[in-house]
Amino acid sequence: MAKDIEASIIGRIASAGEIDAGEISRNTELAELEIDSLVLTEIVMDIEDEHDIEIDLNTAEAWESLKTVGDIVDVVKTLVAAKT
């Protein structure tokens, strides 16, 4: 399931940013993808809905912690694991 989560997130980011998913890895910095904060917020909301989780992004520090695709993947994996 962990790989499914990663693939799903990469797919969402690729689709939203009109980028080839093969060009995105865990180490890809979100800033490199040129996805604005509004689109990133929509991606996060879609991920939350898909996995029935809530990612706390109500503070500047929370946004600061999401620098790479892997950061998002790790947060989602942690929240999904905490549900079980």
Image (cartoon, grey):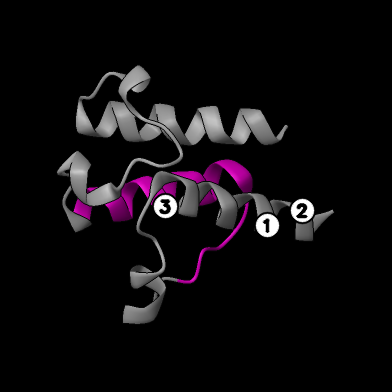
Q: In the shown orientation, is residue 32 left or right of residue 83?
A: left
Q: Does the magenta segment cover residue 54?
A: yes
13 up-or-down from 40: above or below: above
Residue shown at the point (28%, 18%) measured from the top left: 20
**Quarter where residue 35 is shown:** top left
Q: Earlier in the sequence, mark 1 or mark 3?
A: 3
Q: Residue at x 30, y 26 (%)?
A: 15
Q: Nearer the viewer, residue 79 or 50?
A: 79
Q: Indicate the quadrant where residue 62 lies.
A: bottom left
The residue singled out by tag 1 in the image is: 78
* Residue 59 in view of the camera: no
Report the Cα–Cα distance between label 1 and label 3: 16 Å
Q: Earlier in the sequence, mark 3 or mark 2?
A: 3
* Residue type marked 3: Met
Are the residues tagged 2 and 1 within 8 Å (C-beta)?
yes
| Residue type highlighted by circle 2 | Ala
**Residue placed at 56% from the left, 63% from the top?**
54
Give the residues drawn in magenta, as a range.
Answer: 38-56
Q: Which residue is mark 3?
A: 45
Q: How far is disc 2 from disc 1 in space, using C-alphas?
A: 5 Å
Q: Residue 83 vs residue 11: left or right?
A: right
**For residue 48, side relative to residue 4 (left or right):** left
Residue tagged 2: 81
